[in-house]
Amino acid sequence: MRRFATFAVAAILATGLASAQTGEPGLETARRIDLKEASSLVKKHKAVYVDVRPKDAFEQGHIKGAKNIPLGELMGRLRELPKGKMIITYCA
């Protein structure tokens, strides 16, 4: 099962939709985390960042090490996300 944490409302909605499709817990289980917790989880290799903005916005600047999967493509690219790690989505 993939666990999701989010920084933005759009990303929360995406995780809820993704969960609905996979039969896993949905939007109600997605939680918001602050930057300090997110950074700690990524440094411990327990989580990865996924930037859900369009590619051009991602190319203008993003969190170091983040993977870009635009929100509109998220459902079709879930297999690209690592299993066993928290997925931290953001769009700002």
Image: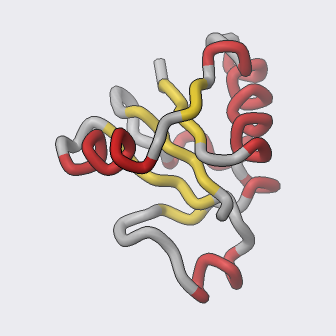
Residue at image point 54% right, 31% down: 4
Q: Position of residue 45 (x, y in %)?
A: 22, 43
Measuring from the top left, give residue 92's x and y in whole percent.
66, 64
Q: Position of residue 84 (x, y in %)?
A: 34, 27
Residue at figure coordinates x 71%, y 61% from the top left: 70
Of residues 85 and 30, the one nearer the viewer is 30
Look at the image and name its color scheme: secondary structure
66 relative position to 37: left or right: right
Q: Is residue 44 above or below residue 15?
A: below
The answer to which quarter of the image holds residue 68 is bottom right
Horizontal and vertical percent position of residue 87: 48, 39
Task: Say if 6 sits above or below 17 in the image.
Answer: below
Residue sticking out furthest to the bottom: 60
Give the residue drawn at x 68%, y 80%: 57
Locate residue 26 relative to residue 42 in the image: left or right. right
From the viewer's perspective, is residue 36 above or below residue 32?
below
Q: Residue at x 58, y 60 (%)?
A: 51
Q: Relative to 67, say whether 56 is above or below.
A: below
The number of callouts visible is: 0
